[in-house]
Every structure is written in C-alpha cells, then in structure tokens.
C-alpha cells in the first residue's frame, strides 16, 4: 500500500458510517444533557465509535471474517443472524431511513406547500436510488469516489457549520432533563445504538477488507494492521464531529424546545446562517445519507452474492435498491417505529459476540461458551426489544425489571455474564475444539 492509502480508506469508512443517525442524535443528546454533556457524549462515543471499531478489528483478526465469528455459536446462527443484520441495516431499515431523512432535510424546506409531497418524495427517491445503483455497480472505485472526493467536501461543510456555531452561540448551559439527570453516561451509551454503526461494521468489514486487498495486501497480519489504521482515522473523525455537533445542541437548548435532532439542527442552521444555513444543512444531510446508502448497498451486494453464488452482485444491488426505494416511500415515521425495538434486541448480541471474539483463545470449547452466552443474552435482549414496542410482558416484565442495570436499559449484562460463566464451566467437561480461524 502507498503511504496515504490507509488514510483515504479511513475517510471512505467514515463516509459509509456517517449517515442520518450520526447527524440526528448527538445534537439532541447535547440539548437534553446540558451540564452533563461530557458524561453523556462519552457514553455515546463508546457505543457509536468504540464498538464499531472493535467489530472491524475483530473481523480482521478472524480468518473467514464475521461469518466465522457467527459459526462459533453455530453455522445456522451465523447465517440467520447475519441475514437479519444485513436486511435491517440494508433495504428494510437503514437504507430507506437515510433516504427519507435526506429528503426531509434537503428537499422539504424548499418545496412549495401546495405541492404533492408524496409525489415529490417518489421522484426524489427515484433519482436518489438511480445514482446509488450506478455508483454501486463499480465497488472497486468506491474508495476513490467516497474517500478522496465526497468525504473531504462533507467534512469541510460540517466543520464550517460548527465553526459558525461555536462563534455565534454563546448561551449558558441548561440543566439536564429526563434520564440525563441521573444516568447521563448510560443514557448516552444507549443513544449510541441509534447510529446503527456497530451493526453496520458487521457489513462494512467485508468492504474495507476488500479495499485493502485491492491495494495488494494479502498477509493476514498486514490486513489487521491496515484495517486498524483506517478504523482509527474514521473513529477520530467521528468523535470530533459528534462532540462538535453535540456541543451545538448544548448551546441551542435555551433557544427553544425541540422534538428531535433534525428539528434542532434545522433551527440551528437557520438561526446562524438564515436560508443559506438551511441549504448548507440540506447539502450535508444529502451527502452523508447518500454515502451511507451506497456503502450499505455495496455491502449487501457483496454479502448476498457470496452467500448465494447463483445470484450475481449486480442482481443483489438491483434488488436492494428497488426494495429500499419502495420502503422509503412509506415515510420516515413508519421506518423509525421499527428501528428502536430492533436495535435494543440486536446490539446486546453483537456486543457479547465481539467481546467473546477477543477472549476466544482462553476458552476450552468455543462453541459451548458462545452458545450459552448467546442464549442467555438473547432471551433478555428480545424482552428488551418487546418492551421497547410498549408491549406488556406481564410477569416477564417484573423479572426484567429486578435485574441489575434494568433502570438504564442494560438488563442483559448480568444474564450475559451468567451465560458466559455457565459456558466456561460446561466447556471444562467437554472435548476441546480447535479454532483454526484465529491467529
């Protein structure tokens, strides 16, 4: 690899990560956390940056990547879990979410109220997905398009908005509200789920490793080395942006009441720069969401074409764009109703799976430990997801609420530890299974 290739691949990775959720949630966190902002943003960065980077590192350490990590539980679990993750962060959730957010922020402020918004969304999303399809057809050049061209423009626009905000916004910090009053760090930790980046890392891992291999790197140790370098570049940029736009949210809290991050950012940009600020914010959202949709579409294309060799990469990309286009036209509110329960269920499983990967060498029987941990974690992750829908779980709700950390939405931690402990105990009485996938 050339001297700056890792840096540009890092920019490419940043561009894929940085989508709708990455823009929406930090400023709203800032507005609600107030004087507890630094604790809250620390929790947010831990799950919004640290966990995705840990996932990428784990994938680079294991021969066979994320599929082999899932196989340590069971091959069926690996396939089912990854298919659900790819479909969710792809055409069924993240892709339409990013498309509709780009529309809400980049188009809606400028259309005539008398126009048919449904028709405008249809035409906008049709053009949006045509461009996504066209660029995704050539994955070998994605790093060039997104890492070297689009991302610098995106970062420059964000930095410009933040600088103006730091100069002009000079209001006292407000007191924290809601859960930020007593558990700012844990609330920020859970808010980091909403970026979906840890799940996206499971998908982006194959894209990043492919980009590095295209630079002539084939040795496993060097693949891990360059993956880590690229991940650090993306992680530093993400952290800086999160803190910056989060701090703008802190300073905007005294300027009104906001229902969500999009409303807050829209008010901020208009207050700072008038109509030009609205246009700049729309441009930022459009670029960010477009990059993420292209990255997710490419990742889905590579995964499913490898999973089902009879279906070509181009066919998968076409299907993903058509499904994403269809669901995007349902509207943002319908999409967001699904996202929180799914994330509350999927994130604990992902966190435990990745933690086990780093300690894999200490297990006598990998499959027993992984299987037990996933079983115990999965039960309470599902209960958390069902609870997030508002469903009354009856006696199960009572069981869930008596667990440690339940008040901050982390009731799965103790069951996960119990599952790991039982798995390790059982593994001592079972035949050791060699794991050739780890260096």
Image (cartoon, rainbow, N blue to C red):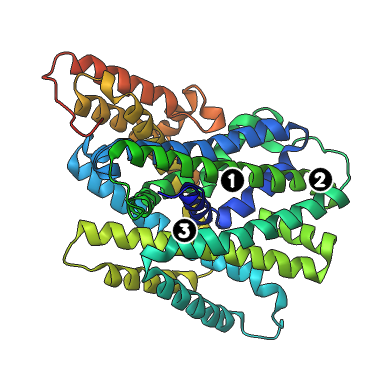
List the residue tagged with mark 1. 238
Instruction: Tell me the number on the disc at residue 251.
Output: 2
Q: Quadrant of residue 354?
A: top left
Tell me whether circle 1 and circle 2 mark residues in contact (CB < 8 Å).
Answer: no
Q: Residue at x 55, y 38 (%)?
A: 190
Q: Is residue 96 above or below residue 232?
A: below
Single out the mark in the foreground, 3 or 1: 1
**Residue 109, image x, y percentages:** 71, 73
Q: Quadrant of residue 244?
A: top right
User: How far is the residue under mark 1 from the one under mark 2?
Assistant: 20 Å
User: How far is the residue under mark 3 from the one under mark 2?
Assistant: 29 Å
Left or right of 432 on screen, residue 91: right
Q: Is residue 94 above or below residue 429?
A: below
Report the quarter where the C terminus lies. top left
**Residue 330, image x, y percentages:** 49, 71
The foreground one among 122 and 12 is 12
Q: Is residue 393 visible?
A: no
List the residue tagged with mark 3. 94
Could you say whether the residue bearing mark 3 is in a helix, strand or loop?
helix
Could you say whether the residue bearing mark 2 is in a helix, strand or loop?
helix
Q: Residue at x 40, y 43 (%)?
A: 346
Comes first in the chain, label 3 or label 1: 3
User: How far is the residue under mark 3 from the one under mark 1?
Assistant: 18 Å
């Amino acid at each position: 690899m050339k001297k700056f290739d890792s840096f540009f691949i890092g920019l490419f990775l940043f561009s894929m990560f940085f989508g709708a959720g990455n823009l929406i949630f930090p400023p709203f966190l800032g507005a609600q956390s107030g004087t507890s902002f630094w604790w809250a943003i620390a929790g947010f960065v831990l799950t919004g940056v640290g966990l995705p980077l840990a996932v990428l590192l784990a994938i680079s350490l294991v021969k066979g990547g994320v599929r082999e990590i899932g196989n340590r539980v069971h091959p069926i679990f690996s396939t089912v879990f990854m298919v659900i993750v790819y479909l969710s962060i792809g055409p069924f959730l993240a892709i339409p979410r990013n498309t509709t957010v780009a529309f809400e922020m980049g188009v809606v402020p400028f259309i005539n109220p008398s126009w048919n918004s449904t028709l405008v969304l249809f035409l906008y999303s049709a053009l949006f997905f045509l461009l996504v399809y066209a660029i995704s057809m050539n994955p070998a050049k994605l790093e060039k398009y997104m890492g070297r061209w689009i991302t610098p423009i995106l970062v420059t626009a964000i930095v410009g908005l933040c600088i103006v905000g730091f100069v002009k916004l000079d209001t006292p910090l407000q007191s924290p509200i809601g859960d930020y009053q007593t558990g700012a760090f844990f609330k920020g930790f859970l808010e980091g789920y909403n970026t979906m980046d840890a799940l996206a890392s499971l998908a982006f891992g194959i894209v990043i490793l492919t980009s590095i291999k295209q630079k002539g790197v084939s040795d496993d140790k060097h693949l891990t080395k360059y993956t880590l370098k690229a991940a650090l570049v993306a992680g530093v940029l993400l952290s800086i942006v999160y803190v910056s736009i989060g701090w703008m949210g802190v300073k905007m809290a005294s300027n009104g009441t906001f229902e969500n991050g999009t409303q807050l950012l829209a008010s901020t940009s208009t207050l700072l720069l008038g109509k030009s600020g609205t246009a700049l914010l729309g441009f930022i959202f459009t670029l960010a969401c477009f990059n993420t949709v292209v990255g997710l579409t490419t990742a889905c294309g590579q995964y499913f074409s490898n999973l089902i060799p009879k279906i070509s990469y181009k066919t998968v990309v076409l299907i993903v764009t058509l499904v994403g286009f269809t669901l995007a036209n349902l509207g943002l509110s319908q999409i967001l109703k699904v996202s929180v329960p799914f994330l509350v269920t999927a994130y604990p499983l992902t966190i435990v799976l990745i933690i086990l990967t780093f300690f894999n060498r200490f297990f006598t029987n990998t499959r027993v430990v992984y299987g037990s941990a996933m079983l115990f974690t999965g039960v309470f992750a599902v209960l958390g997801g069902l609870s997030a829908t508002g469903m009354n779980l009856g006696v199960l709700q009572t069981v869930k609420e008596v667990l440690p950390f339940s008040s901050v939405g982390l009731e799965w931690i103790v069951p996960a530890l119990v599952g790991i402990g039982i798995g390790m105990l059982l593994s001592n009485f079972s035949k050791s299974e060699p794991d050739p996938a780890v260096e």
